[in-house]
Amino acid sequence: MQFQGCINLTVNLLQSESSSACEAAAGLLRSISSVNVYRDVVAESGAIEEITGLLSQPSLTPEVMEQSLCILWNLSVDEKLRVKIANPDVLPLLIKSLEDEDLRVKEAAGGVLANLTLTHSNHKIMVEAGIVPKLVSVLSLF
């Protein structure tokens, strides 16, 4: 890719203390990661790791959280990236996001989890992370 440095800079902006800069960077990465040929570049730039750190922050705004989860949702379309996303650091954050008050955050987290289930090797780690009781709890609300 010709502009990989731009993606690296954008990923670095996810560390910004400014929520508007974070939201803008996450929104741009969300758009880029929606294009099939750029998914690997976004993942290789460290976006998954940065998003993991970002989602761990208790003061994260719903807008930044939604954009970040949507990046993971876009990346999780790729089977090889699903395995990278379905790890013990990310899964608890996705499960916790299902409890968020913002419906868009819940939907994005659910989308990532739904994509992760498409890879059979993720099933065991997802069950061990506690996804089944959480899904039962969420689905019983409807």
Image: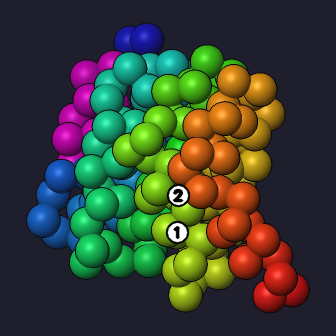
> In this view of the protein, can residue 64 be seen by the observer?
yes
Furthest toward the left, the residue is 17
Question: In the structure shown, which secondary structural element does the residue marked by tag 2 occupy?
Answer: helix
* Image quadrant where residue 101 sits: bottom right
User: x and y percent of residue 119 in the render?
Assistant: 75, 27
Look at mark 2 in the image and give the residue it sits on.
94
Q: Residue 8, relative to residue 44: is it above or below?
A: below
**Looking at this view, is 120 or 109 the one in front?**
120
Q: Is residue 51 above or below residue 3?
A: below
Say which residue label 1 marks: 97
Residues packed near mark 1 inside 10 Å, few (<14), some (14 to 19) or many (20 plus) = many
Task: Name the residue: 43% across, 66% down.
Answer: 65
- Residue 62 placement: quadrant: bottom left
| Mark 1 in CB contact with mark 2 (< 8 angstroms) | yes
Q: Which residues are magenta?
A: 4-13
Residue type, label 1? Ser
